[in-house]
Image (cartoon, rainbow, N blue to C red):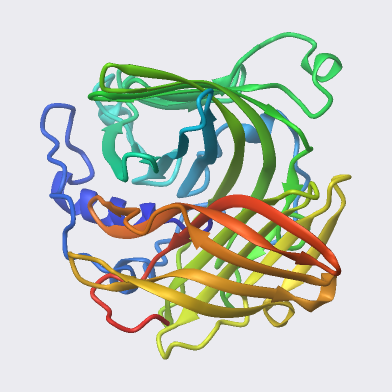
Amino acid sequence: MLISVFTVVIGVVILQIGPSSEPGQERLPAAGGSSRLSELLNDQGRDGYAQAIAARDFVFPADHGPHPDFRNEWWYITGNLDSENGRRFGYELTIFRFSLTPSGTESSEEVSAWRSNQVYIGHFAVTDASARQFHVAQRYSRGALGLAGAVAEPFRVWLDNWSIAGALPGGPLQDEYEFGQPWQLQARDGEIALNLTLVPQKSPVLNGVNGLSQKAAMAGNASYYYSITRLQTEGTLQIGDREFVVSGLSWLDREWGSNGLSRDQQGWDWYALQLSDGSDLMFYNLRRSDGSQDRHSAGTLTLADGSTVHLSRDDLIVEVLDTWQSPRGGRYPIAWQIDVPKVNLSLTIDPLMDAQELVTTVRYWEGAVDVSGWRGAMPITGRGYVELTGYEGSDVPR
């Protein structure tokens, strides 16, 4: 996930709750509100915050934890799961952190257990393909009184009873697991609950240039961005009074920075695909307001052995094959042909189901997909997730 919808959501939340309200005084804006990405994502708001300007050294597991000197960051996990009897599911859990003021700017008079300059927002979604159901939930809270927060040692980020954590904190994890410690994911909303263990099958991949992912021309319009592209996943999924034992593959994205889109950028299409030959493809197509593809669009192909190939805008040819009209307005592309001549790859992407639109404070499409195609003369299949923003209220895919 790149420059997240979270920046939009938090802009609306701040307008509602103000920068100094305390728990019990906060009101969540109505789902499906009218806020548009183009109006809120171009807010620079950089004064006093650390900036993603130059490449840096990444240190794990420390960088799994929070980076409070930056304005915003997110922990994003999606996955495709199968039950023991072959029932198919997709899921997303994302927890976002947003700083209302730069670190160290609070006066001593403002220090209180009730107060915090950190806001956390979460999105939780489950695709139940067999039942043709899509379940979505949103939560938010101040980072106060233990209601939400993030720590690096031992790693944990949480929002109420939604959490992502190191499954085995404090042990000799690198000796036990080749690519780092497992992750434990837990989330419940009403009759939907996930309890998963995720074991990395590859080391973290640094996207962009050594982890610096430039999103626009201005210095600082960038993020630090890494992915763990393949995590073996096992656990349980509860829907109503039924509990399914599930397994599959998940994808982790981590980004942090202090700026959003430039004013002439409309939105993005983001693809995360896990292929049957062991390779994983991530690409984000940034769209400009005139419908053209932004030159900062980029991606990474991670090969089965963990080595990577950087992809620029000109390395991919993307053709929209089908669209879906949201009943709430807006038309999304939902099927694609993607060709990557640089690596002799040709893929067709189809949604697990069409209606995978998250109707939260803002609307966007984020859904599980199936992949088929060719690597040269070799047939290839796969699964993944696609995120689409900037289409709400528009009838023409950009």
Q: Residue at x 73, y 60 (%)?
A: 300
User: On the rendered structure, is 305 left or right of 75?
Assistant: right
Residue 386 picture location, percent across and down: 50, 58
Q: Nearer the viewer, residue 203 or 201?
A: 201
Does residue 12 appear to the left or right of 24 in the view shown?
right
Query: Where in the figure is residue 144, as x and y percent of width and height?
Result: 31, 24
Kindly tell me whether residue 81 is visible in this rendering. Answer: yes
Number of residue marks: 0
Could you say where residue 345 lies in the image, as x and y percent from the top left?
77, 69
Residue displayed at 31% across by 44% down: 134
* In the displayed structure image, the side of residue 381 where residue 85 appears, left or right: left
User: On the image, which quarter does residue 365 sit in?
Assistant: bottom left
Q: Is residue 132 left or right of residue 262?
A: left
Residue occupying image coordinates x 27% and y 56%: 11
Q: Which residue shows up at 28% across the image and 59% down it?
A: 363
In the displayed structure, would residue 179 be above or below residue 131?
above
Instruction: Tell me the quarter of the image containing the C terminus.
Output: bottom left
Q: Quadrant of residue 109?
A: top left
Q: State the image coordinates of residue 157 (x, y, percent, origin top left).
A: 48, 27
Residue lying at the far front of the rendered structure:
85
Answer with the quarter of the image where residue 253 lies: top right
Q: Is residue 123 visible?
A: no
